[in-house]
Amino acid sequence: MKLFHLAFAGVLYLVSFAGDAFAQAADHYVTIQLKSGPVVIQLMPDVAPKHVAQIEALVKKGEYDNVAFHRVIPGFMAQTGDVKYGNMEKNFDASLAGTGGSDLPDLPAEFSKTPFVRGTVGMARAQDPNSANSQFFIMFADGSFLNGQYTVVGKVVSGMENVDKIKKGEGQNGEVSNPDRMIKVTLGKK
């Protein structure tokens, strides 16, 4: 009889633990509201814990709200996240957008074997691999040439059709005049 009670208690513990794990996983989603609809990104703290923590901190502070997609290259990716020069309601400067970051420190690279495929979210950086800060990009298509060169932080799990509708850049480097923006960015699924 005692063994039954211990086994029963063990089952309750496992059920409770599974519930906690599910709650924690749910905390690592970001929803970006675009003009065409929402985009849900599942962040990967197991792949890039420092980068995910920084993104989540910036989302909590509302830093990504109204930030432009300043560089969008058809068939490649859409880049955003310059909170210093990219906020289209506070500090937007088209000539500087893409050169700034946040007030938080730059991050050491967290390269992984996770491949860059359609829907992958990666961190933008300068020439120095340890220079990622707040900017990120969403892949329109596979980009194996980025594998092991940039930090993967997540993947789009719904709303990729809305990513596809982001206004594309005209210039050689994908610069966008009158760009689309992340209207509101929140933690969790919406």
Image (spheres, grey):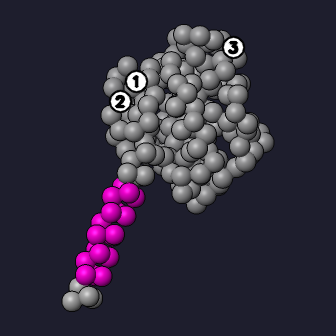
Report the magenta residues as a range. Answer: 5-22
Dot 1 lies on which element?
Answer: strand
Of the 4 image quadrants, the one containing the N terminus is bottom left
Dot 2 lies on which element?
Answer: strand
Dot 3 lies on which element?
Answer: loop
Which mark is first along the chain, 3 or 2?
2
Please say whether residue 38 is one of the residues in the magenta stretch: no
Residue 96 at what x, y percent from top left? Answer: 70, 17
Residue sitting nearer the eye, 72 or 37? 37
Q: Nearer the viewer, mark 2 or mark 3?
A: 2
Residue 93 at what x, y percent from top left? Answer: 65, 12
Q: Can you say whether 51 is above or below 186 in the image?
A: below
- The answer to which quarter of the image holds residue 70 is top right
Main SS, magenta residues: helix
The answer to whether marks 1 and 2 mark residues whose Cβ atoms lie closer than 8 Å is yes
Q: Can you say whether 76 is above or below 25 in the image?
A: above
Q: Is residue 144 visible?
A: no
Give the amino acid type for the residue marked by disc 3 in the picture: Ser
Residue for badge 2: 38
Question: From mark 1 to mark 2, how far is it between C-alphas?
Answer: 6 Å
Question: Label 1 neighbourhood size at 10 Å, few (<14), some (14-19), many (20+)?
Answer: many
Of the 4 image quadrants, the one containing the C terminus is top left
Residue 180 at what x, y percent from top left? Answer: 47, 18
Residue sitting nearer the eye, 88 or 70? 88
Question: Label 3 neighbourhood size at 10 Å, few (<14), some (14-19), many (20+)?
Answer: few
Residue sitting nearer the eye, 15 or 169? 15
Badge number at residue 95: 3
Residue for badge 1: 34
Give the amino acid type for the residue marked by disc 1 in the picture: Leu
At x 61%, y 39%, the residue is 54
At x 66%, y 52%, the residue is 110
